[in-house]
């Protein structure tokens, strides 16, 4: 009864409570260096992280090739005040330079761009530049689906995206969307 008049949950919320309002994407577990991952050139990588994701994210970033031929965009569910500390920590833990994504910035290969926390969704726009939009009343923010969707829209098959969680059963391995 409480949900009457409420919009259907977004994909992240639906997965959290076990409801399914949309078909599941094609999902495969992939290890870095997996031959299937090298069948097409990747121009951009998108990674979404739940609140418990910083540890697994740091491990994933440290495993990336040192001369990665694509930029990495990351949306981590976090409040804005914690963004600078997370950027510093991820850089130290992973050995990769991580920076807060800036609106208007053109993402460059080999760089990692973290969405600023809080109610801001990081987007990749046509013309290959970064932008933000307000996340409104979303329960989870920055919104991972909006970032990954914008990457897919701009880069198409040249995009690679996935999610990292750090709590519960899903903490064992990152999951990548094919």
Image: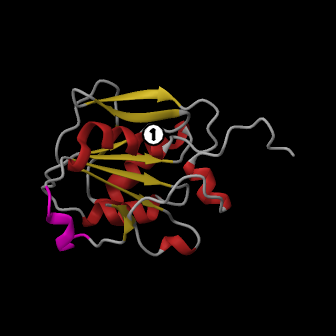
Q: Is residue 99 visible?
A: no
Placement of 101 over or under 31, stated as above or below: above
Which stretch appears magenta? 32-40
- Looking at the image, which residue is at 46% across and 45% down? 145
- Looking at the image, which residue is at 53% across and 48% down? 77
Question: Which scheme is used to colour this image of the protein?
Answer: secondary structure
Whole-percent x and y of residue 31?
28, 73
Whole-percent x and y of residue 126?
26, 28
Residue named by callout 1:
146
Q: Left of 28 or right of it: where is 68?
A: left
Was residue 127 drawn as part of the magenta stretch in this picture?
Answer: no
Viewer-side residue, 35 vs 140? 35
Q: Is residue 96 visible?
A: yes
Whole-percent x and y of residue 135?
55, 32
Residue furthest to the right in view is: 1
Viewer-side residue, 127 vs 97? 127
């Amino acid at each position: 009864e409480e949900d009457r008049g409420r919009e259907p949950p977004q994909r992240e919320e639906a997965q959290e409570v076990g409801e399914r309002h949309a078909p599941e994407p094609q999902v495969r577990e992939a290890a870095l260096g997996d031959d299937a991952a090298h069948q097409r050139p990747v121009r951009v990588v998108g990674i979404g992280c739940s609140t418990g994701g910083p540890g697994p994210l740091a491990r994933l970033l440290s495993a990336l090739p040192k001369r990665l031929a694509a930029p990495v965009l990351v949306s981590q569910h976090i409040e804005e005040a914690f963004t600078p500390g997370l950027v510093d920590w991820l850089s130290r833990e992973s050995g990769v330079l991580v920076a807060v994504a800036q609106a208007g910035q053109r993402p460059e290969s080999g760089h990692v761009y973290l969405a600023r926390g809080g109610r801001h969704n990081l987007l990749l726009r046509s013309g290959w530049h970064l932008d933000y939009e307000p996340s409104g009343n979303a329960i989870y923010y920055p919104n991972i689906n909006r970032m990954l969707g914008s990457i897919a829209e701009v880069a198409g098959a040249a995009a690679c995206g996935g999610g990292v969680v750090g709590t519960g059963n899903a903490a064992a391995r990152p999951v990548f969307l094919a």
